[in-house]
Amino acid sequence: MGFTGVKRLKSKPRGELVAALDIGTTKIVCFIARIDDAGEPRIIGIGHQVSKGLRAGAIVDMEAAETAIAHAVHAAEQMAGETVREVIVNLSGGHPSSQTLSVDVSIAGHAVSDADLRRVLRAHTQAEVPSDSRILHAIPVNYTIDGNTGIRDPRGMFGDRLGVNLHVVTAALSPLRNLQTCIHRCHLEVETFVVSPYAAGMAALVSDEMDLGCTVIDMGGGTTGISVFLDGRMVFADCIPCGGVHVTNDIARGLTTPVAQAERMKTLYGSCTPSVSDERELIDVPQVGEDEPSQANHVPRSLLTGIIQPRIEEIFELVRSRLEASGFDKAAGRRVVLTGGASQLTGVRDLAQLVLDKQVRQGRPIGLPGLAEATGGPAFSTATGLLLHAVRNQGDLALGGGGGGEEEPAAGVWSRLGGWFRDNL
């Protein structure tokens, strides 16, 4: 089947169910939440499954991926006592690409209305979206009136010309098609796609970090996502096809041990930074093909650190080069938030500070009722952020221009720019 697009996000009324599906290279997580009286999602069901059939965030075995997704969703439905039909899905692969578009229109001196917002947003027909890509996000970053910048909501203001800077995130069509097909085979509809670092940032950042400037590094199993937030909006997104799985594979190759044992050693003894006791501390390394425990190698812990550190350094160096190339390295300030499962490795924060020369903290999901301690760690930031995106949406045009909650501007922009919603209009 072809890629048919997704429905427009609608505001969620009190009591409605919302489901988030985080499909990663190493794990699949399904959160089901109900919108409470305050308009916030309260988690009522959680499903967690080892991921199969994915590599670097993209599906490589449709049947295996379908089975894993179905099991995760079923577990969440059983816990919630509900059945879901639509899910909000992350995209951790697909080669996301960011671009900022600018346009302005005449408003002839009258007060800016909703119709003027629709008109200026529809004027983005000059966006060059390749035929093999689709738009995921179209976020108004900044409005201008007669050259005056920094306007978040221009409605009711007077001027001669109204302009907008729009952050557009596109992704390759083939991974989207494969992902949507796999989810359809689980008898589910995709409500919308969200790039993983966007969702992770919404879950792990506090409002001051979003406003003042912050870089989010979402360290997953197969990919490392990057997003930059400024003035309360995401202004840049990117993805590096390298993550925790690559560290595990390096250990398995370097110590000739099974992958499962390499993952165990990484979790129990792994570190990004050497310590004085590493040379004296010996760890058992079961060898590939050897069944007898007596055949295990005994190697100093420093050897394990020596394998892990170069790979994590490489990831942060790639992040630094992507940020510098984007031009948002300085705009994002000196604040970095690390999240994702691979960010829990010992010493990763210190290494990030050293390579990036920025202030680094580890981020985890914050401010979501019903989130158990076992699922409240950095590995669950993306799944949590998908739920938050459903109700807050941070000004994404899926809910209308200027964050006003109107749906018509979204329909105009998305249909003109990317053709996402033609089947639903």
Image (cartoon, grey):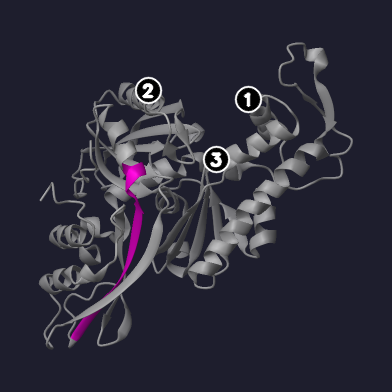
From the viewer's side, name the closer residue of 310 and 172. Answer: 172
Q: Residue furthest top?
A: 292
Residue 191 drawn above or below residue 262: below
Name which of mark 1 and mark 2 comes first in the sequence. 2
Residue at horizontal 43%, vertical 33%? 60
Residue at horizontal 55%, vertical 68%? 324
Residue at horizontal 82%, vertical 45%? 275
Q: In which quarter of the image is residue 337?
A: bottom right
How many residues crowd mark 2 within 10 Å: few (<14), some (14–19), many (20+)? some
- Name the quadrant of the N terminus: top left
Q: What element carries label 2?
A: helix
Residue 368's x, y, as percent?
39, 44
Residue at horizontal 75%, vertical 48%? 273
Q: Mark 2 points at which residue?
A: 67
Residue 161's x, y, as percent?
20, 85
Disc 1 residue type (three-letter) = Ala
Q: Distance between the residues labelled 2 and 3?
A: 22 Å
Disc 2 residue type (three-letter) = Thr
Residues drawn in magenta: 161-176
Residue 242's x, y, as percent?
56, 46
Q: How far apart are marks 1 and 2 (CA)?
A: 21 Å
Q: Which mark is residue 231?
A: none
Name which of mark 1 and mark 3 comes first in the sequence. 1
